[in-house]
């Protein structure tokens, strides 16, 4: 019984997260400005991290936790670099 | 199919509730990103995902692994702390970049530095009596 | 004490992070302690300003206040998004003169304002101490000024200044 509850709820959650990423991707393609695209990239990283965590709950393996941590780190660093680029036109001053 | 067979019913319900709450808040934030009309409105939408969206899913994952391995598994707290600390940094940098770009192009709709100072001065003057 | 452990709080949180990542065992406590002490001594080379906490007893109160506000504004922003075109809202900028000058206090205020859905930190002018925030559902500018000043700034000034 608990298995059924868990599989269904995690599947629905994964569907919602994929839909959320689709929304972000739509805005990423639509723009209109560069800052909108960078904002969506950042939000997409967060959604992808949460999706990896739900995969971890589904398979019962803690390995996915590390993958999620790495995605979060990469998302932060890349968004900061892109924001810096938008502000100055160069990443390293 | 999954090792979740060993999970008691109450834990499964709790995990399901947390995960669904987190996922729906994230989806609400994403809908906001699509729906809002300007960049400065859109900047409010991802914070839904990074505050309670992430908290819900991480809490669900924490409960799941703690009950499954019958010992406290707390390393999800690290991701939560990391996300709450880094989101303001990225959003502030993006907001400043957007403000800088809009001001440099002379777009209407963003207050210039002089506007900002004078409007704050007005409220200060009122306070000073 | 200050020669061996220049930043005790940093060392403790690094050790805690190591244990959370690797699991608790005596071997990892020793290894984590070694890494944490080494890393916090490296920090000395960066010369970060030492935070002065004047009244740290107020921190739990600030934390609860922030959690309550984040819950409230999560609900408010979600309802704005889901109601869509049926509900009109006006977003706008608010300029707020701040008396808070402590750098760490300002950083904490920035984190609070930005991580609360519905408000975002946009710009801060260091010379005049004027802060510019963007508010999603802006009904009354003066109300927001009062809110930031009385709710957060007063408490942060008590803690840090």
Image (cartoon, grey):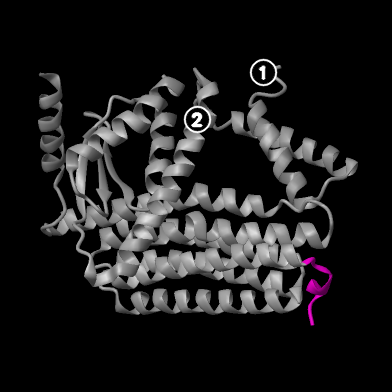
- Residue under mark 1: which chain is it in? C
Q: Nearer the viewer, residue C84 or C153?
A: C84
Would you say residue A84 is visible in this rendering? no
Q: Position of residue C117 (x, y in %)?
A: 38, 53
User: Label 1 neighbourhood size at 10 Å, few (<14), some (14-19), many (20+)?
Assistant: few
Q: Position of residue A11 (x, y in %)?
A: 62, 79
Disc 1 marks which residue?
C2
Q: Which residues are magenta?
A: B1-8
**In which quadrant will I find the N terminus of chain C?**
top right
Both marks 1 and 2 on one chain: yes
Q: Which mark is residue C61?
A: 2
C132 displayed left or right of C65: left
Would you say residue B87 is visible in this rendering? yes
B71 displayed left or right of C150: right
Residue at image location 11% in from the left, 26% down from the top: B126
Q: Position of residue B129 (x, y in %)?
A: 10, 18
Residue A52 highlighted magenta (yes or no): no
- Residue under mark 2: which chain is it in? C
């Amino acid at each position: 019984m608990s298995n059924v509850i868990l599989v269904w709820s995690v599947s629905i959650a994964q569907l919602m997260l994929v839909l959320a990423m689709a929304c972000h991707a739509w805005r990423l393609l639509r723009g209109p400005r560069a800052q909108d695209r960078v904002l969506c990239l950042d939000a997409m990283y967060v959604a992808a991290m949460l999706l990896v965590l739900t995969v971890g709950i589904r398979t019962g393996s803690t390995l996915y936790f590390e993958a999620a941590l790495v995605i979060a780190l990469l998302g932060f660093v890349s968004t900061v670099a892109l924001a810096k680029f938008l502000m100055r036109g160069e990443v390293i001053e | 199919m999954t090792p979740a067979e060993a999970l008691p019913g109450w834990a499964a319900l709790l995990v399901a509730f947390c995960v669904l709450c987190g996922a729906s808040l994230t989806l609400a934030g994403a809908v906001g990103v699509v729906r809002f009309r300007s960049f400065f409105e859109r900047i409010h939408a991802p914070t839904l995902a990074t505050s309670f969206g992430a908290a819900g899913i991480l809490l669900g994952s924490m409960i799941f692994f703690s009950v499954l391995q019958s010992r406290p598994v707390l390393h999800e707290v690290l991701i939560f702390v990391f996300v709450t600390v880094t989101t303001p940094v990225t959003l502030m940098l993006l907001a400043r970049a957007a403000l800088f770009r809009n001001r440099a192009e002379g777009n209407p709709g963003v207050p210039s530095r002089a506007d900002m100072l004078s409007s704050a001065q007005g409220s200060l003057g009122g306070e000073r009596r | 004490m200050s020669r061996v452990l220049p930043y005790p709080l940093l060392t403790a949180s690094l050790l805690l992070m190591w244990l959370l990542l690797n699991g608790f065992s005596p071997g990892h406590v020793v290894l984590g302690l070694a890494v944490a002490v080494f890393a916090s001594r490296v920090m000395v080379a960066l010369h970060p300003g030492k935070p002065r906490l004047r009244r740290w007893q107020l921190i739990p109160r600030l934390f609860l206040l922030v959690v309550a506000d984040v819950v409230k504004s999560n609900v408010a922003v979600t309802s704005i998004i889901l109601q869509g075109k049926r509900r009109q809202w006006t977003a706008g900028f608010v300029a707020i003169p701040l008396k808070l000058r402590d750098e760490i206090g300002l950083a904490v205020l920035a984190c609070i304002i930005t991580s609360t859905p519905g408000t975002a930190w946009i710009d801060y002018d260091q010379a005049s101490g004027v802060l510019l925030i963007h508010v999603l559902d802006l009904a009354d500018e003066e109300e927001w000024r009062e809110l930031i000043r009385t709710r957060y700034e007063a408490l942060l000034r008590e803690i840090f200044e």
